[in-house]
Image: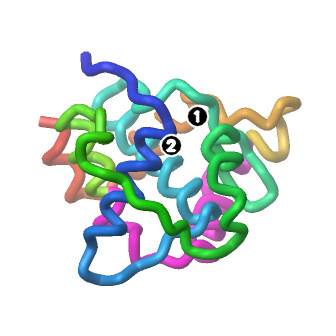
Amino acid sequence: MSGIAKAIDVANFLLFLKEHDPRGLEISNLKLQKLLYYSQGYNLALKGNPLFDEPIEAWKYGPVVREVYHKFKIYGDLDIKCTVDWPEITLEEEQMKIIGQVWSRLGEISAGTLVDMTHSETPWLNAWYFSQDKEISRESILKYFKKNLPQELLALSR
């Protein structure tokens, strides 16, 4: 079993990927939150363990990791402009592969479309409508992503 990362390290790696992507894509805090959610979901489905320990909460505009949200809220709905140096990346290779797949598949999708996607998925729906504390349980994320994992990601589970 691989080690569990910090959500902020996953966020920083996503920002690193964005910064080095020739497509010139942007990541707002809203979009970053959804990419964290999908990274956690893909990791749970592929590896059976969480990518990071911090809880994901169901907020009005979809899943949010509170600690990461507060770190980047100064950017509002604008592109997050910060430089992440390679030596600051503390993730394991398997973790980076999964996060890289999330970026590759979802990086071009707008924040609004990602909100719509998460609003149609059972983990957010159940937490938003039925959970007192609005926390999206790992079990619901695992169950959903096990059934809805993109085919090209199945190769990563071997």
Nearest the viewer among 129 and 56 is 56
Q: Residue at x 66, y 38 (%)?
A: 67
Instruction: Give residue 153's mark.
Output: none
Percent across and percent down for residue 13 are 36, 50
Q: Residue at x 47, y 76 (%)?
A: 26
Above or below: residue 70 compared with residue 157? below
Residue farthest to the top, as pictured: 1
Task: Report crowding for label 2: few under 14, some 14 to 19, many 20 or more residues within 10 A (C-alpha).
Answer: some
**Magenta stretch: includes residue 127:** no
Which type of secondary structure does the marked residue at label 1 adopt? helix
Above or below: residue 145 compared with residue 151? above
Residue indicated by mark 2: 144
Percent across and percent down for residue 118 are 61, 59
Nearest the viewer among 134 and 73 is 73
The amino acid beneath tag 1 is Ser
Q: CA distance from mark 2 to mark 1?
A: 6 Å
Q: Which residues are magenta?
A: 102-126
Nearest the viewer among 2 and 11 is 11
Q: Quadrant of residue 157?
A: top left
Q: Residue at x 88, y 30 (%)?
A: 132
Q: Residue at x 17, y 43 (%)?
A: 156
Residue farthest to the bottom, as pictured: 23
Percent across and percent down for residue 60 are 81, 57
Above or below: residue 92 compared with residue 113? above
Task: Report crowding for label 1: few under 14, some 14 to 19, many 20 or more residues within 10 A (C-alpha).
Answer: some
Q: Does residue 123 show up?
A: no
Q: In the shown orientation, is residue 153 left or right of residue 74?
A: left
Residue indicated by mark 1: 140
